[in-house]
Amino acid sequence: MSGGVDSSVVAGLMKAEGYDVVGITLQLYDHGQAVGRKGACCAGQDIQDARRVAEALDIPHYVLDYEARFAETVMDEFADSYLNGETPVPCVACNQKIKFRDLLETAEGLGAAALATGHYVKSQPGATGWELHRAEDKERDQSYFLFATTRKQLEFLRFPLGDRPKAETRELAREFGLNVAEKFDSQDICFVPTGRYTQVIERLRPGAAEPGDIVHLNGSVLGRHTGIINYTIGQRKGIGVAAREPLYVIRLDASRREVLVGPRDALRARILTLRDVNWLGDEPFEAAASGGVDVLARIRSTGPLQPATVTCDKEGVIVELAEGEDGVSPGQACVFYAATGGGERLLGGGWIKSAEGGAWLAENDFAAPASRGLAEAFAAGSS
């Protein structure tokens, strides 16, 4: 129970259906503006909201201090990922390492038969085990953030909101007499005050952001920056250099502290290398992907599904996007859905280790020796 309307309604639904319900709230952080701002969760006022909901439903309620675990496994990794030139997705890490690992183990230890959450996603038993499917309300679907959930975890998890639109959830909250019926939805990065992630990174890693060069794909140095954490791949505004043509951030080289910029056409990536892949398909992953398995892939949580082929060999797990994607960054997630059935079933996904976008570079021959080295490194997908 995060203190929001979704998890509160789940508690109400379970109680109404006759289950013996225990409400668990995790205190994940307790600092700065993030505690009191609208759209936060698992801190400050949200804990009080969850407690009041539990009182209204007449169920036991416990607050567990997971602040140290959250700081180590989510916030610290979030900061380090940015310092390494990546773009992390902390909500996936929170589900993977806190809610569906530590909290799930706690629930089992309490003797619970299941852990019900307010995520908008559907699970159901299939031919080879439990499956995950996209929510009925596609605007609310959160399956992207749950790609790392394992089959064993799915056996214990329940998602009562998967078949309901958000409007119905709020109406149920009113029927249950819950004070959170009109509460704002939580934001993606709950612990980032005012949405400025650089403030959190600088607080967690003081002085870690070092200055460096802003370099064009042709090898010329265009200016200086104050830290690569201030840039994201695909960024256009606020780069800090003047040029005749629009420039975009193409790559972040943490080892050299360089921000590599170039034209929009150089942003396109088609070949992705993944790490830490989780697979929920019927066949074993190695067997399915050894000859290439067709999927629908999603790079961003709100991005479109596009045809892709996933292969697995001694080089690792490779995803070839049929149409390509602009602004792909290491640290992001690539999530797979079934190519049949409209992509309703989630098949898993992995973390992007590198993205190759050499088509534009191959068509543009630079004369400067330095630029060849940069271009070759980018085309090879180094990160």
Image: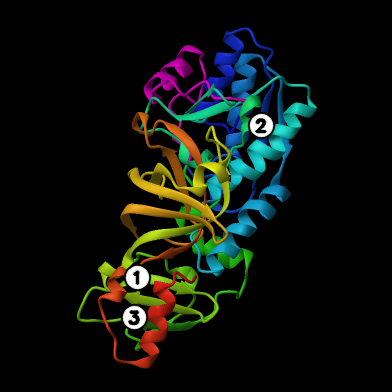
Between residue 64 and residue 215, name the one nearer to us. 215
Q: Is residue 39 visible?
A: no
Could you tell me the amino acid type at mark 3? Leu
Q: Secondary structure at mark 1?
A: helix
Q: Residue at x 36, y 29 (%)?
A: 341
Can residue 354 be spotted in the picture? yes
Q: Which residue is mark 1?
A: 358
Q: Is 341 part of what is drawn in magenta?
A: no
Asked if 125 appears above or below 365 in the picture, the reply is: above
Q: Quadrant of residue 297?
A: top left
Badge 2 amino acid: Lys
Q: CA distance from mark 2 to mark 1?
A: 40 Å
The span picked out in magenta is: 157-186
Which residue is disc 3 drawn over? 217
Question: Mark on residue 152?
Answer: 2
Q: CA distance from mark 3 to mark 1?
A: 12 Å
Q: Nearer the viewer, mark 3 or mark 1?
A: 1
Q: CA distance from mark 2 to mark 3?
A: 46 Å
Compared to 354, does 75 lie above or below? above
Residue 43: which disc? none
353 horizontally vs 343: left or right: right
